[in-house]
Image (cartoon, grey):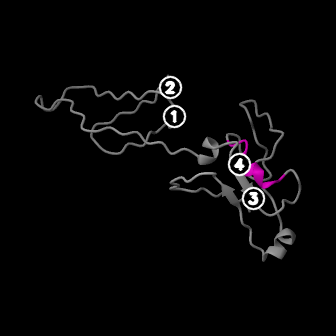
Amino acid sequence: MTKCSQAFFDGGFFKLTVPTTGKYILARREGDAFDTEHAYMWMEIRAYQTPNLFIELAGTLTISAPAPISNVWPANNLITNLSQRSAGMDRPILIDAASTQATFKSCYKTNSSILSPLGHKLTLTVDLKQVFFVHAFLFVADV
């Protein structure tokens, strides 16, 4: 079991300082209660998960975009190998603590000449295959 420990002393929303995965949640309060009549009451508990849908739906997603500048930079790179990403288009992807470089790319590249017939508009379409409540989207562009 992975342990994620942090102190809390009152009610409220608590963001885990070390996001973790696990099968069980254990909440424990220690110390003397300030009021013996209502000592250690718990009124409600909730746990929230914000998964990366691209990871959760890996293998079922499809993506469409204008042609890449070469076959090593297709848009499909954006939805594969999601646990191993490059910090920039020209930076190597390191896949372990020994700094081993990946043999794949994690970015999509196209250029102005490819986008010219499209009015210089770059449009990516990701088909999730079902309806989801999406509350955030992260887009990172390396310029």
Residue at the disc numbered 3: 64
Residue at the disc numbered 4: 79
Residue at the disc numbered 1: 20
Query: What secondary structure is found at the residue carrying circle 4?
Result: helix
Q: Magenta includes 31?
A: no
Of pointers 4 and 1, the one earlier in the residue sequence? 1
**Marks 4 and 3, Cα distance to the nearest angstrom?**
11 Å
Q: Nearer the viewer, mark 2 or mark 4?
A: 4
Q: Are marks 4 and 1 in contact (CB under 8 Å)?
A: no
Q: Is residue 100 shown above or below 50?
A: above
- In the rendered image, which quarter is residue 55 located in? top right
Mark 1 crowd level (few <14, some 14–19, many ≥20, 10 Å Cα) = few
Query: What secondary structure is found at the residue carrying circle 2?
Result: loop
- Residue 134 locus on image (x, y percent): 53, 55
- Residue 136 locus on image (x, y percent): 53, 56
Instruction: Give the amino acid type for the residue marked by disc 1 in the picture.
Output: Thr
Residue at 77% across, 55% down: 75
Residue bounds of the magenta highlight: 73-82
Q: Nearer the viewer, residue 78 or 99?
A: 78
Residue at the disc numbered 2: 2
